[in-house]
Amino acid sequence: MSIAKYRSDVKDAPCANGSIMWRTKWMGGRTPAKVENCPIDGDMTPRMVYVQGDADSFFSIPAACSYKGKRVNGWLEFNSDDDGGWLFHPNKD
């Protein structure tokens, strides 16, 4: 079973850190679906990170990725200070 929740229709331009947001075309606008080449906080190995629901605040979007064969839940944030791009923060379990 895939961890992708939304389809990916439109690709944004690459950010400064190399991450690329894919969005879904909905009637209400373009909704985040996944981030390609997304660095992971602490690991910094770029991965495909999938959006798992609606944003729970202005700054974070629930997301998940696969790491060493396991599903890792966390959230996405747009980091405009350092590299300027999307960054995945895994939940601390």
Image: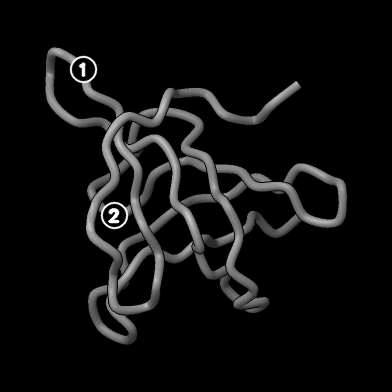
70 is higher (above) or lower (below) than 55: below
Residue at position x 34%, y 50% in the image? 21
In the rendered image, the vertical position of residue 11 relative to residue 52, given as above or below: below
**Tag 2 and tag 1, C-beta contact below 8 Å:** no
**Residue flagged by tag 1: what amino acid is it?**
Trp
Judge from the rendering whether residue 45 lies leftward or rightward of residue 89; answer left or right: right
Outermost top residue: 27
- Quadrant of residue 84 within the rendered picture: bottom left
Q: Nearer the viewer, residue 51 or 36?
A: 36
> Considering only vertical position in the picture, is 71 above or below 46?
above
Instruction: Return the mark for residue 86.
Output: none
Name the residue located 58 percent from the left edge and 68 percent from the top edge: 46
**Disc 1 crowd, CA 10 A, few/some/many (<14, 14-19, 20+):** few
Quadrant in which the N terminus is drawn: top right
In the displayed structure, does residue 8 sit left or right of residue 39?
left
Q: At 29% from the left edge and 45% from the top edge, which residue is drawn?
A: 11
Q: Position of residue 2 (x, y in %)?
A: 69, 26
Q: Quadrant of residue 90?
A: bottom right
**Under tag 1, what secondary structure?**
strand
Residue 7 point in image, percent of width and height? 43, 24
**Which type of secondary structure does the marked residue at label 2 adopt?**
loop
In the rendered image, which residue does mark 1 sit on? 26
Tell me where residue 44 appears, x and y as whole percent. Answer: 60, 77
Residue type at the position of mark 2: Phe
Sort mark 2 into few (<14), some (14-19) or many (20+) by Cα contacts within 10 Å. few
Q: Quadrant of the C terminus?
A: bottom right
With 1 as the anchor, is 42 left or right in this view? left
User: What residue would you read off at disc 2?
Assistant: 59
Q: Residue furthest bottom?
A: 82
Residue 38 rendering spot, x and y as whole percentages = 50, 63
Compare marks 2 and 1 and give the one earlier in the sequence.
1
